[in-house]
Image (cartoon, coloured by chain):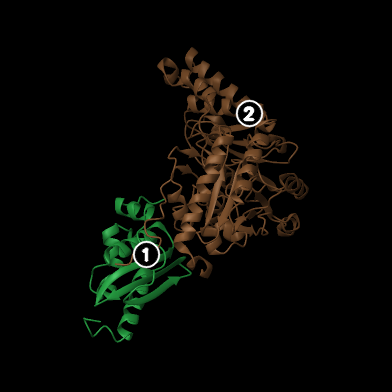
Chain colours: A brown, B green
Amino acid sequence: MHKPMSEASISLEPADDRLIYLDYASGTPVDPMVTAAMQPWLTGVGSAANASASHRIGQSAAAACVRASEQVAGLVNASPDEIVWTSGATESINLALLGAARFQSERGRHIVTCVTEHPAVLKTCDELRRQGYDVTVLPVDSGGLLSIDAFVAALQPDTVLASIMHVNNETGVIHDIDSIGMVCRDHGVLLHVDAAQSAGRLPLDVRAQGIDLLSLSAHKLYGPKGVGALCLNRQRSRRVEPLLFGGGQQRGLRPGTLPTHQVVGMGQACELGADHLSTEPAKVASLRDTLWMNLQQLDGIQLNGQADQRACHILNVSFSGVDGESLLLALEDLAVSAGAACTSDGAEPSAVLRSLGCSDTQASSAVRFSLGRHTSAEEVEQASMRVVGAVTRLRTIAEPLAQQT
Amino acid sequence: MSSYSALVRTHFFAPHGTGELATGPGLVVSGKAGAQADRVAVAFQLRVAAGVIDACVFRARGCPYVIAAASLVAAELPGQSATAMRELTARLLADRLAVPRDRLGRLLAIEDALRTCWQAWENSGLSASPSS
């Protein structure tokens, strides 16, 4: 019996099985200060308090919610009464797009968005299309950037709304919201910005940036899951039609009993995000750059997204000759994503990367690393070693086939 | 990410028979297959002596099911009659590995590569002689 030369010489078992979390773009750990702020509203009479009730504990809950609105407003330079609490960014986006489009429908029925938007935007636009609206979906260049000239050219006399994300959730690419906001203001078009990935990582100012509607999610900035906010810039005297109907809470824009603990948690998370804004992004960007530098000891890797216009926390890399799903399993003790956690079942290449011009093969071999507040330099070194080891082993199994596909 | 069976995990993390066959007695047949659309590529090398598969190695690029299935083939074919090359189907492998129905198509590359090996064995003229 002739044994294959390399039989049993390849193992994909990680040498160190300690979990390293590098998936901050899909969810961040709840900050202990957030947990502490939520605690009084999760136990005893605090957990029973309804912010709409007139008794003392109800009013106490209402005051806590107002305080939380102030904290969220503080992060984006809005007024507390411009904050509408939702169940998360997906609901905020639905309320912003459906609500604004319906409110503006007498004025026009054209909407502009971008191909790399989150499915919450694109699928809501599909729904608007089914309801008779006209939607223009703009392409991006190979860096994932939207051309301002193309954006201006897409505007029509009946354009009432544009929806452009601040930071792409897969590549980290930053869109030039300041310029887009200025264009929208000049053309009388409402601008909705999905800021789920940028809040707490980049400065946000709905006034200065000309943002009319801003969607936020707590669990992307160290708050709890299940709560988000829509910021409505009332300086532009805009309104949206509600999607839900009920008891009249939140001025009827989003009725339903406020979840005090969630709201307080998101408020605290936003305050912490504002406090950390001057230091944390630079630290995270430095770790991200170290990770990228370490990975470059591998041949055949590609950075996805414009290198010099990315948020601090996301690194998206394609590894040639390797299937992304296999890489993820080989790295199962490294919490990373193939594409976006919101959409990926591991089977299909990322539509975002395909829109940047990546081939199916490049897109399917992509891994998104996302770093955050608790990522350490040691974790980055460990993660780098695990990735280099796993890619090398998978390429060894595939060679020379990898060169042919 | 999918939830993988224990057998998939075993073969994925410690694959059998990766690489190239060393030189030795017997006939070496090889076959490869793959579909760009499925992002799968598989190649097998088998050594056949006296109508019996003596060794099997593979190269594979694809999802964990593809790597695990190729490893399972490389682990189980040695010692079997050469006819096993044509009898091992994607469906049989999928059943053994509990591969989800929507991924079954990816294992077709393995079946195709083994059929190519079988064809090479048949074309060698040695398949008719059990003592070859």
In front: B116, or A361? B116
The three-letter amino acid code for the residue at tag 1 is Pro
The chain carrying label 1 is: A
Provide the residue designation for mark 2. A81
Farthest-out residue, front: B24
Residue A345 horizontal/vertical position (percent):
44, 53
Picture quarter containing residue A273?
top right
The three-letter amino acid code for the residue at tag 2 is Asp
Q: Residue at x 22, y 81 (%)?
A: B131
Residue B75 horizontal/vertical position (percent):
30, 62
Provide the residue designation for mark 1. A4
* Circle 1 Cα neighbour tier, 10 Å, few/some/many (<14 / 14–19 / ≥20): many
Mark 1 and mark 2: span between their CA atoms? Answer: 71 Å
Residue A303 horizontal/vertical position (percent):
62, 53
Q: Determine if residue A44 is in view.
A: yes
Is the residue A136 above or below the residue A77 in the image?
below
